[in-house]
Amino acid sequence: MENFDKIWRAFFALGIIAIAVQQLFCGDFRPVIIPEAWPAWLQHEGRLVSTWIVSLSLIAAGIAILFDLKARTISLLLGVLFLLLVIVVQIPYQSTHYPLHLGSWTNPFKTLVLSGGAFVVAGSLPLQGNNSGFTKSLGMLIPVGKYFMAITMATFGWMHFLYPDFVTPLVPNWIPWHLFWTYFAGVALMLSGIAIIINIQRRTAAALLGLMILLWFIMLHVPRAIADPHTGNGNEWTSVFEALAFSGIAFIIAGKRQEAK
């Protein structure tokens, strides 16, 4: 699986680039980056300028990963950026608005996956010469990346059981037994997350997780985005890009190289 790491890194990088381009097109942050109308001080002209700065930075980081331009260092910095967004922006927003509704925490968890994914990407890349002490220190975060992904997937799986009325309509109409597949996917997400956390058949679990998310990307998210490209400034397209990035992360976790990190 690790022989394909360059492809999986491309999945992650393209997902990040696409989200950033979407932000530039919409002139605002996607909720997975910064929630709408939050924080209060980041509004009007300041929000637009910030959107462009962050988006261009994400595009530059994605390109660096795609073409292996100091990709390990850039990935570590990208992971820190997403982690700071979780701590400084996403968690305070959810704690203020919807603290007790697990479903409303979807975006903070997704941002956490992007953070972990960037660390996982860094771990799939060889050490670069003349690393500074700061970069080496950031490298200590690489092992936590897979746990960010695993905890989120297990939580999302549990949400399938908490909110079946929301999840079931997402199953394409041409697939029968919607409720069965809702619960099946929930179990699969929880088992894959737990397997990665406790390191039991981790590579197999991560590979199957990546395959499942990639199938959702093809069969679920892309068709939904084509059918409804405009609602929420293109929320369905954001889901497409997230799924592509998430599948790449899972496939990298399935690689042997991560075992030594």
Image: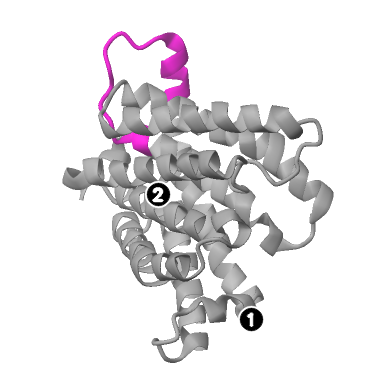
Q: Marks 1 and 2, Cα distance to the nearest angstrom? A: 26 Å
Question: What is the span of residues highlighted in magenta in the rendered image?
Answer: 121-139
SS class, disc 1: helix
Residue at label 1? 165
Q: Is residue 19 one of those drawn in magenta?
A: no
Q: Residue at x 43, y 37 (%)?
A: 118
Q: Nearer the viewer, residue 32 or 204?
A: 32
Residue 53 in view, yes or no = yes
Crowd band around label 2 with a 10 angstrom C-alpha radius: few (<14), some (14–19), many (20+) = many
Q: Given the image, on which type of amino acid does mark 2 rest?
A: Ala
Q: Quadrant of the C terminus?
A: top left
Residue at label 2? 245
Crowd band around label 1 with a 10 angstrom C-alpha radius: few (<14), some (14–19), many (20+) = few
Q: Position of residue 84 (x, y in %)?
A: 62, 32
Q: Nearer the viewer, residue 119 or 6?
A: 6
Q: Residue at x 50, y 66 (%)?
A: 190
Q: Given the image, on which type of amino acid does mark 1 rest?
A: Asp
Q: Position of residue 244 (x, y in %)?
A: 38, 54
Is 55 placed left or right of 165 in the picture? left
SS class, disc 2: helix
Image height of 256 relative to 161, above or below: above
Image height of 129 relative to 54, above or below: above
Location of residue 9 by image quarter? top left
Q: Looking at the image, which residue sits at the far left?
A: 3
